[in-house]
Amino acid sequence: MQEFFFAVISFFLIEPLQSAMTDRFGNISREQFAGVTSCIREATPVLVGQVTNDPWQTATHVFGIWSGTTPPEDILAATTPGCAETVRSLEGAGAQAES
């Protein structure tokens, strides 16, 4: 049963997260890309566990990403401390690139 949840979460949440992060922060260094990849790997079991513990929050995340109302980095930052650090570094790099 957990494999089924993982497949559903991967399709509806993880893949859109990866795609949105790539679209939003496409021009990042290899180190930052490695950080994002590591963050998504770290966040995946947390998000899969969330399906059984709080399906409503998961549905809200999926809808927010797919509709464009919730930035994917906000969801990643909220999952684990490592993701919060990665997102802060990406936002800092994005602000420097815009300057």
Image (cartoon, grey):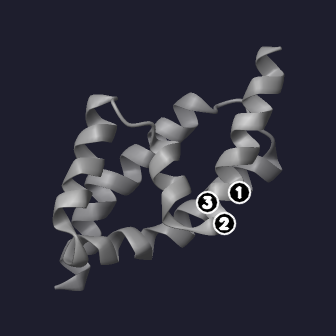
Q: Secondary structure at mark 1?
A: helix
Closest to the observer: 89 or 25? Answer: 89
Residue 52 drawn above or below residue 16: below
Which amino acid type is marked by label 2? Gly
Q: Quick check: marks 3 and 1 in contact, CB under 8 Å?
A: yes
Looking at the image, the residue that sits furthest to the top is: 99
Which amino acid type is marked by label 1? Glu
Q: Quick check: marks 3 and 2 in contact, CB under 8 Å?
A: yes
Where is residue 95, by image quadrant?
A: top right
Residue 4 in the figure: left or right of residue 73: left
Image quadrant for the N terminus?
Answer: bottom left
Image quadrant for the C terminus?
Answer: top right
Q: Secondary structure at mark 2?
A: helix
Residue found 56% across the figure and 37% down from its top: 22
Q: Position of residue 5 (x, y in %)?
A: 22, 73
Residue behind mark 1? 85
Residue 57 in the figure: left or right of residue 75: left
Can residue 38 be spotted in the picture?
Answer: no
For residue 83, the mark is 3
For residue 53, the mark is none
Distance between the alpha carbons at the discs numbered 1 and 2: 5 Å
Residue 61 drawn above or below residue 24: below
Residue behind mark 2? 82
Q: What is the crowding at mark 1: few (fewer than 14 residues within 10 Å), some, or many (at least 20)?
A: some
Closest to the observer: 60 or 65? Answer: 60
Distance between the alpha carbons at the discs numbered 3 and 1: 5 Å
Q: Quick check: marks 1 and 2 in contact, CB under 8 Å?
A: yes
Q: Secondary structure at mark 3?
A: helix
